[in-house]
Image: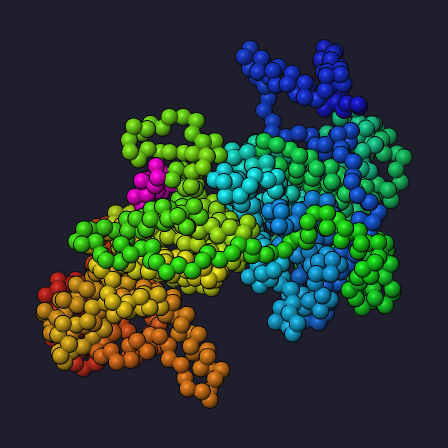
Amino acid sequence: MAVQPVIPREVDELEEIWEWIESFDAVVEHGGRDLASKILQEIRNRALACGVPVPFTANTPYVNTIHVSQQAPFAGDQEIERKIKSLVRWNALAMVVRANRVEHNIGGHISTFGSVATLFEVGFNHFFRARSKDFEGDTVYLQGHAAPGVYARAFLEGRLSAQQLENFRRELKPGGGLSSYPHPWLMPEFWEFPTVSMGLSPIMAIYQARFNRYLEDRGLKPKTDAKVWAFLGDGETDEPETLGAITLASREHLDNLIFVVNCNLQRLDGPVRGNGHIIQELEAAFRGAGWNCIKVIWGSDWDPLFEQDVDGLLAKRLGETVDGEYQKFIVESGAYVRQHVFGGDPRLMKMAEHLSDEELHKMRHGGHDPKKVYAAYKAAVEHTGSPTVILARTIKGYGLGEAGEGRNVTHQQKKVDEDTLRHFGERFGLKIREDQIEQVSFYRPSDSSPEIKYMQECRKKLGGYVPQRRVRSKPLPAHEENLFTEFLTGSEGREVSTTMAFVGMLRKMLRDPEIGKLIVPIVPDEARTFGMESLFRLVGIYSSQGQLYEPVDMNTLLYYKEAKDGQILEEGITEAGSLSSFIAAGSAYATHGINMIPFFIFYSMFGLQRVADLIWAAADTRCRGFLLGGTAGRTTLAGEGLQHQDGNSHVLALPIPTLHAYDPAFAYEIATIIEDGIDRMYRKGESIFYYITVMNEPYAMPAMPAGSREGILKGMYKLRAANNGKSKQRAQLFGSGAILREVLKAQELLEEKYGVAADVWSVTSYKALYSDGIETDRWNLLHPGEKPRVPYVSETLADAPGVLVAASDYLKALPNLVSKWMPRRVASLGTDGFGRSESRDSLRNFFEVDARFIALATLRELLSEGKIQASVVQQAIKDLAIDVKKPDPLTS
Ligand SMILES: Cc1ncc(C[n+]2csc(CCOP(=O)(O)OP(=O)(O)O)c2C)c(N)n1
Ligand SMILES: [Mg+2]
């Protein structure tokens, strides 16, 4: 076995060092690499014990991690795989070029796939196992901008038609089309995970791998060697989400996780690290975090050079070359490479003298060499004890030649001229007719061609096609009995918060024989904040290690119990990580065929505001489950100031199409929403999920009024009619969540002091009312000859007399959203502006949402309607002690 020294001989001045190196070489030669590694470790410990400083470096030289002598042999037919890859490349290119010929500016990317093609193809032909009846399959997150290559392959596999390819990025065309990027929502039988918002797929992959272990440790699925693969761009690693959770993966020993970073050294605008080394930077980060790191930098063409590099001179020179320069080598000639890589030292020049300029220019990078890639993948799947990252050096725009290869503009290249197409065809040895090249026609050889047969055979061996999305879970059986009956009858005067009520419901669900085991409580270090610590003991906190220590509170009833089969995912302070767990759990009905029901509870301000893009990704993934925004409301979370007080989240929930958002005030409302949500998602199979805000203000929970169920779910119902209905002054008051009780107080105030008869409505969901309103408007728009439909808000308020006033702990925008369907204009009270660290009463005064302001707004509306005199309102301002000079919360 040839051993390559890593210390350049030129820095060695002492013969003694060489004696050591020779002894070490002998150990490697005769005792093996494992023994050599142990000796090094012991010597290192010894040095530290003797006070000898040991220089720290997380990097290895700029060479392949797997020495050629250690490389697993390629297990396929390289020639035919090359042909298949060329066909995939051609069709991917054709798809993008054709799409842009037909529709100017439709966009599309070819250069990303150009770089990642070999990395994908080796995976498709040899590694990615499909989900089947007998095996859960590997989970593969594919670099989103490389989607054309995935479609092109599926076309060759016979899974997508030429018509679909023709309609790339034009899903609305007859016969359907293909979405620009992986979209499970738009292509629910194809894509499993949306990956194009940079940084989300790596963090989702990490938590997916951990969730797979969770399911195994809890006995919900058999232990398998299924892998989670995530392909990402090197530019993408700048997103904090990409690297933000990598220590979780190593801490949890997730050897079921493999990252492949497509290191083409470029991002959209230019080099990722022109003046540095992205591969080395990532190696240090991943190795430092405890990952198994495999660098695949150089192709097989380089092996003979490294074989000669006994002094490590070449490795040293390559390590000094910055990425910007490497990029230049791609666009320059072989002579330029010779001069700049080998030119500085006669010994290096000699090494390359047998290579022509042409040969030098063509020297392949590791990520374009199937042999190197195969060996790296094989090592990765066989590695145990930690996750693996493969850093594969590639060329952006590979195959586009002067039109794009390695150019800074390549990312957005989508139109290519005929010369480039011809060059492309020649370069990849495509046997396509001239006219097909000119027309950029799709090309698929017959089913009986060796290429198609080979690729089908490979996929058959791996259990079927990838990617492919199938919902394999059976819906839970219909259920008559209400799980939450006890929450519908009120708390009999006992003061509880809606958070406490929710925790009671969670406890009930956890104990339920049918759904108990399916519940996944997720918390980002806030369980105590939400009074959930009793669940620690009840179901345990999941820990793959069990509990290796005696917790300090062992002798208490509610001790911090970690267990291998624990049910709670206590994620620590990471909303992004928790959301990723939520997505893994909420999509398990498809990924694993198990109807897991996640409940992720978090500070409501740190949810939609902080990780909305992941929530969007959850929607796109067709995720199911419940998000609970805890300690919600701008004026309800007293004492926390502007960072924690949330008056926004219900507005931020509006854009997410499948998210049903509720702001309930009472336990029975929450119980009704959750019961119905489980029914819709897990018994009826709707791909929706829920956002429910819960508060920490304790008050007595009333019993559920008869007939209110439908209204609770649809967004509003009449909670308490006026006692003095005969009064001439009438009003309708709308209250939500935390502010509903202020509205009830205002109702009394108005009756007692001003003789106004006000009905009170609980508005549980402005989003639901809004969605119903716009759906109804749309139907009416498109059906002019038919009897118009009436939005729920209009129908419900048709006979409601008097002025309209709405108040919530959220922005005034919410009631305004639905005002157009109300019989008259609505006066909105809400909490626009920055919060304050104050008491509840002061906050409600400051934001003008307490009972006094609700009463005032009602009187003001009556004045506008000419029902009362201005003097009555002026007097009310005095009586209610309202400071008209107080600062405007919106701007102060
Ligand atoms: C969150 C987010 N920001 C920006 C973009 C736009 N964008 C798409 S691809 C890209 C560059 C990607 O570079 P890299 O990750 O290196 O992938 P490559 O195409 O080079 O393989 C950018 C900025 C995005 N998709 N997501
Ligand atoms: Mg890149």
Lateral position of residue 87 relative to residue 760, left or right: right
- Frontmost residue, 704 versus 655: 704
Q: Quadrant of the C terminus?
A: bottom left
- Frontmost residue, 818 versus 879: 818
Q: How is the image coloured?
A: rainbow
Name the residue: 76% across, 27% down: 313
Find residue 299 and report its image quarter. Answer: top right
Lateral position of residue 214 relative to residue 457, left or right: left
Residue 117: % across, % down: 73, 50
Please say if 612 is above or below 394. Answer: below
Name the residue: 75% across, 49% down: 458
Magenta segment range?
Answer: 525-538
Please say if 128 is above or below 169. Answer: above
Residue 142: % across, % down: 63, 51
Residue 457: % across, % down: 77, 50
Name the residue: 13% across, 79% down: 726
- Frontmost residue, 410 versus 90: 90
Q: Is residue 513 visible?
A: yes
Please say if 76 is above or below 185. Answer: above
Q: Quadrant of the N terminus?
A: top right
Find residue 423 and report its image quarter. Answer: bottom right
Name the residue: 64% across, 64% down: 178
